[in-house]
Amino acid sequence: MIDANEPRASEGRPDANEPRASEGRPDVGEPRTSDGRPSRTGGAGESSRAASPSPEARSTRLRPALTEILAVVVGLALVLRYAWLMDDAYVYFRYVDNLVIGGEGLVWNPGEYVEGFSSPLWALLLALVRSLRLDYWSFVRAAGLVSFGAFSWLAILANRALTPQAARGRTGYNVPLVYLAVCYGALCYFTSGLESPLVLVMAGVYACALVRPRSSVFQVFLGISPLVRPELAVPFLLSLVFIRIRTRRVPLAAIIAALVSVGGYVAFRIWYYADLFPNTYHLKDALWASQGLTYLWDAVAPYGTIPLLVGMAALYLWLRRRVGPEALRHGERVAMAVMALAVAAYVVKVGGAPIHFKDLAFPFALAVLSGGGLLEAAAARWGPGPRSWTVVGTLALGVAVAFAHPRQLPRPPIVRPVALRHNVTQLISDAAFHRSPSAGLIPGRGTQADMLSYDAAERRHARAPRSDRPIVESWCKTAYVHPSTPVVHSLGLTEPFLARTPVDADRPAHKFGLEQLAEDVARVRALYGFRAGAFESALRDGRGEEWMRRNIESLRSIEARAYNDHRFLENLRLALRPPETIAVKESEIGRMEKRAD
């Protein structure tokens, strides 16, 4: 994808990122002729033209090398092999089916306006899929394949841009692509039913946007990235600063895209949900850095990520002394590393996630992509013989990473991923539990074969009478297959009152102490309905709990949000209020049996 505003070397303008001939040594960054020999021309204009690749080189710049093609083919096969659905995906499925099939709106329970999902863009995409009467499970796998293909193309594009000019046209080893195309942790999240494939594609988009800062197309994708995950607002703001410094222009395409997409959705959120943040923000906002560091180590230790990044850094420092930082795109690599660290720091701050690798997919992929082009630059100096060994080494790296596995699994998942049992290690689980047939999350045979089809969902919505008595449930799939039953999510994921109750987490995003409070909330809802004033009525009749009496003002405020009338100005006033907090005593919360998921 070449932007019309991107400067071409063929236009005769020296690029600030290209190597200079004045370094005075025949090196990988020195101007060369089209056949790869050092240029003997002397004038500044001639040096600039000699440093530019030939038209033939430019035309083949994005042609994948054999190593890259092999990596893509293997990666596509493994995406299907590792395909799975996380239980949280059923939150999206219930929201979307209530909108498209039930006609209730984008809600978990009809009439209760709570945004219990994290990715507006993924919810919108699923709504489009459902409106076409498509099956969720088929779409998740298809989206995984398409997303991996898009990510691979972006990884190739970024690798070519990070490769010094004189080394382009060499064999594309593309270590980042080879590594990520076989890494179990990364490949799992091209499926899962969550927004994870979009997150990984955005890592490739950020890498390409930084090496092509004038590209209006990539800027537009940067602008919509916070709709994929809220924490991507951090690298988006950093990218605006980088593009402004690098191009000396305001990145208007990115800013306009953000104002239209993110700004438009925030306005919708205020009008519909009377809040500035999703419910998941209130639930997960915490400080648990010790567990976050454990989560970070759990993600990088199994796949040799630290040795890989250290090796890339050493290779960079070795090349820097010979080629100079401009030829190696020093600023772009540093920007990728800073953005990866910024997102990783947020994940560490909140304690990570209960599932291995999940919330670190973006920083992990972006950090690895920052090492693109280094091996190509080194191979251009080593000569034909060592270059052949470089290909062998790259393939050996891929094989080693393909057979690596997280600590939760007893053996490499590449062998038989569905049959694997797993252990919860330091409060962190693995996709293997959700992938196993016993979990029942992936449609199988018999009665569950069409569980996620449009027709099956339509039948469920049509046949069961609407119930007024809620159930308390933390298993999202159970809530999904009972669309006519109100559900109080016992861990607070879609529950506005519990999400604002600060209780110590037993695992990241798992506060089992909320389960007793969930029973209390369900009892009030069963007696007085899902409406504003229900808690006050319960207290007046002597059927409420003491924690409700102490927190009645907060409960009224939360009810005003969750049962609003969609009047924008009134909802804006509610949204601008400081977040409510419900305080409970240790004796008022339960400690239920902890699940292994």
Image: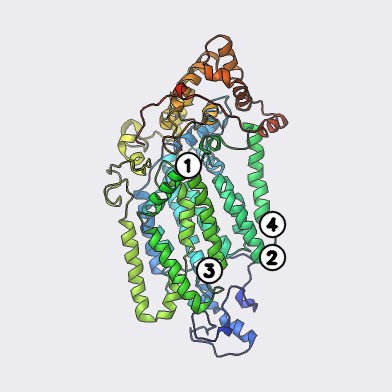
Label of residue 252 in the image: 4
**Residue that badge 2 annotates:** 248
User: In the image, what residue type sits under mark 3?
Assistant: Ala
- Which secondary structure, mark 1? loop
Of 563 and 347, the residue lying toward us: 347
Q: Residues within 10 Å of mark 3 (few under 14, many from 20)?
A: many
Residue 591: image location, x then y, percent:
40, 26
User: In the image, what residue type sits under mark 1?
Assistant: Trp
**Residue that badge 3 annotates:** 161
The mark that comes first in sequence, 1 or 3, is 3
Q: Is residue 232 left or right of residue 416?
A: right
Residue 265: image location, x then y, percent:
63, 41
- Which secondary structure, mark 2? loop
- Which secondary structure, mark 3? helix
The mark that comes first in sequence, 3 or 2, is 3
Residue at horizontal 61 percent and vertical 63 percent from the top:
213
Residue 156: image location, x then y, percent:
47, 64
Per the model, the C-alpha gap separating discs 2 and 1 is: 39 Å
Of 293 and 344, the residue lying toward us: 293
* Quadrant assignment for the N terminus: bottom right
Residue at horizontal 45 percent and vertical 22 percent from the top:
587
Residue 376: image location, x then y, percent:
44, 73
Foreground tag (2 vs 1) = 1
Foreground tag (3 vs 2) = 2
Per the model, the C-alpha gap separating discs 1 and 3 is: 38 Å
Residue 174 visible: no
Badge 4 vs badge 1, beta-carbon distance below 8 Å: no
Foreground tag (1 vs 3) = 1
Badge 1 vs badge 3, beta-carbon distance below 8 Å: no
User: In the image, what residue type sits under mark 4?
Assistant: Leu
Foreground tag (2 vs 4) = 2
